[in-house]
Amino acid sequence: MQHTLEAVIFDWAGTTVDFGSFAPTQIFVDAFQTAYGFALSLDEARGPMGLGKWQHIEALGRDPAIAARWQAQFGRPMGQADVRHIYETFIPLQVERVGAHSALIPGALDVVQSLRQQGFKIGSTTGYPRQVMERLMALASAQGYTPDCTVCADDLPAGARPGPWMALHCVQQLRIGAVSHCVKVDDTLPGMAEGLNAGMWTVGVALSGSPAGWTLAQYQAADEASRANMRNRVSAELLAAGAHYVIDTVADLPVVLQDIEQRLAQGQRP
């Protein structure tokens, strides 16, 4: 079959690896505690997920509830020196522990292998800095997953999500003919913005990602009613952020790509 689509650009944690996106969220909790003895909940840590990690810490500092507790504990707002100290605490913790959450999400490898057989190029972007990704990419490669390109949150002078720059850098590296021939797949709201701002078809992942916050075991044990409730809640958030489609996990991507092909054939664009 002749495809109009040329590439799929995947996120990492919560989309292709680390079901539930636990590696970054738990480390934020630990970094705040280690750096300053400041208590952060896992749900709070998940809030800005998808941003670059420096920007994620800044966003947490601006959260009204967190900012109020910080002010009460330290008598001042969180400043850039605090952000730097937390970030510098976060990175070695993340490098050390990312391996514990590096397993591919079920179905990811089969989907990627099928896409390659069909001639698709595989790009990836991430909120992780390059130092963390060097470790995670090696662990993923050992499981058989090696994208054609990976763009990290600290790679580009322009920045990371929600801007289009990482996704567009993939377009350049993969030598894609048109951004409308690309599909961005991500579990976060900044990831939806990244794809949309880059002019791509954008697919949200509802059940394997950070907004759902399920472990693989919890997902597998959930009955259909529980899955439906979670699917409805997360899908509403992703669709409100502009997602063209929402799927449960990356394993459900092929049927969406078929639909996009049909829409492209009819002259539709993202």
Image (spheres, rainbow, N blue to C red):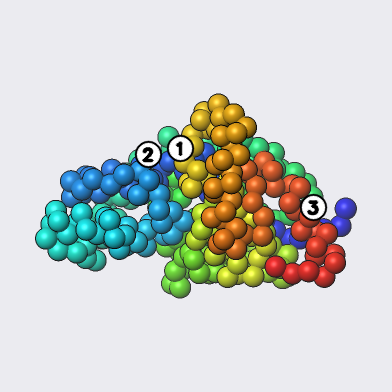
Kindly identify the amino acid type of the residue bearing the numbered disc 2. Answer: Arg
Q: In terms of sequence position, does the residue under pointer 2 or pointer 3 come before the other?
A: 2
Residue 206: percent from left, percent from top:
58, 46
Q: CA distance from mark 2 to mark 1?
A: 7 Å
Q: Please state which of residues 155 and 259 is positioned toward the viewer in this rendering.
A: 259
Which tag is nearer the camera, tag 2 or tag 3?
3
Does 122 sit left or right of 76 as displayed? right
The answer to whether one can see residue 7 in this image is: yes
Kindly identify the amino acid type of the residue bearing the numbered disc 1. Answer: His
The residue depicted at 59 percent of the width and 51 percent of the height is 235
Residue 88: percent from left, percent from top:
27, 54
The residue depicted at 54 percent of the width and 55 percent of the height is 237
Asked whether the beta carbons under mark 2 and mark 1 sit within 8 Å of each other, the answer is yes
Q: Vertical placement of 166 versus 120: above or below?
A: below
The residue singled out by tag 2 in the image is 97
Q: Please state which of residues 124 and 60 is positioned toward the viewer in this rendering.
A: 60
Asked whether the beta carbons under mark 2 and mark 3 sit within 8 Å of each other, the answer is no
The residue depicted at 50 percent of the width and 61 percent of the height is 190
The residue depicted at 25 percent of the width and 49 percent of the height is 32
The residue singled out by tag 1 in the image is 101
Q: Vertical placement of 170 versus 94: above or below?
A: below
Number of marks drawn: 3
The residue singled out by tag 3 in the image is 258
The crowd level at tag 3 (other Cα within 10 Å; few <14, some 14-19, many 20+) is few
Check disc 2 and report its element: helix, strand or loop: helix
The answer to whether one can see residue 208 in this image is: no
Q: In terms of sequence position, does the residue under pointer 3 or pointer 1 come before the other?
A: 1
Query: Which numbered circle lies on residue 244?
Result: none
